[in-house]
Image (tube, rainbow, N blue to C red):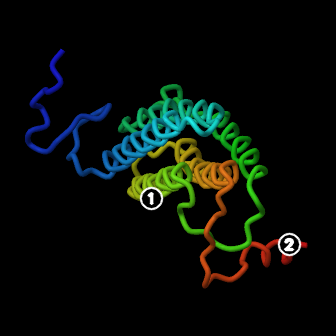
């Protein structure tokens, strides 16, 4: 099997149901998800190489997420998908929420905005978070054109960025590394909690 087809030499690519320019908003959306998947793979490889940490649970989650990012890309590659063709389900998003809750419970309470970083593990997960947010923006841009953008895939990507934030904080806590707070920021999270009481 050849890795090149020459069919994209004039700046177009195939989607399921047609051909579009390579900078089409749909291609930008699933291309950014592909980029995110590469960063998730890099984070997983870095964690797997860390002999000093015990990352089996996180590695298992990242592997599942990589599979599901392929599902998201698949769902976005249809010009007009039929509902039965879509792969991303509400169960996937619900599982992310359970993982988020578990990681959040294993990190200190948050009061201020925090800076991305701390440990190398957390830094990589924060990178995943920011690329995930960009993928979400690309998907929103696709939806705003009136073209098909599967709602569950968008919901999943929105929740996934929260997952990476929670996992990054939990990784720092596991390694005994304190999150660096944004010093000029107010204690916004504590204030919100009080307002809700």
Cα distance between the residues tagged 1 and 2: 29 Å
Quadrant location of the N terminus in the rendered image: top left
Label 1 belongs to which residue? 137
Label 2 CA crowd tier, 10 Å (few <14, some 14–19, many 20+): few
What residue is rendered at 49% in x and 50% in y? 124
User: Residue 160, image x and y in percent?
Assistant: 58, 47
Could you tell whether 189 is left or right of 197 in the image? left
- The correct choice, above or below, for 73 with respect to 166 in the image is above
What residue is rendered at 66% in x and 41% in y? 96
Image quarter of residue 17: top left
Label 2 belongs to which residue? 196
**Mark 1: which secondary structure?**
helix
User: Residue 92, image x and y in percent?
Assistant: 63, 35
Could you tell whether 16 is left or right of 72 in the image? left
Q: Nearer the viewer, residue 52 or 10?
A: 52
Q: Nearer the viewer, residue 61 or 91?
A: 61
**Mark 2: which secondary structure?**
helix
Q: Nearer the viewer, residue 109 or 80?
A: 109
| Lower sequence index among marks 1 and 2 | 1
Label 1 CA crowd tier, 10 Å (few <14, some 14–19, many 20+): some
């Amino acid at each position: 099997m050849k890795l090149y087809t020459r069919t994209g030499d004039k700046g177009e690519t195939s989607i399921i149901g047609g051909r579009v320019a390579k900078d089409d908003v749909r291609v930008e959306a699933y291309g950014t998800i592909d980029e995110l998947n590469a960063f998730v793979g890099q984070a997983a490889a870095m964690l797997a190489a860390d002999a000093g940490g015990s990352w089996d649970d996180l590695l298992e989650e990242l592997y599942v997420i990589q599979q599901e990012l392929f599902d998201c890309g698949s769902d976005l590659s249809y010009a007009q998908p039929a509902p039965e063709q879509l792969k991303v389900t509400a169960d996937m998003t619900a599982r992310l929420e359970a993982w988020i809750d578990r990681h959040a419970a294993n990190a200190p309470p948050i009061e201020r905005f925090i800076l991305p970083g701390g440990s190398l593990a957390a830094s990589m997960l924060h990178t995943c978070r920011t690329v995930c947010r960009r993928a979400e923006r690309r998907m929103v841009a696709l939806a705003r054109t009136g073209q098909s953008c599967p709602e569950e895939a968008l919901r999943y990507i929105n929740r996934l960025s929260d997952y990476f934030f929670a996992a990054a904080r939990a990784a720092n806590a596991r390694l005994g590394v304190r999150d660096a707070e944004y010093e000029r920021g107010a204690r916004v999270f504590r204030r919100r909690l009080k307002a809700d009481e």
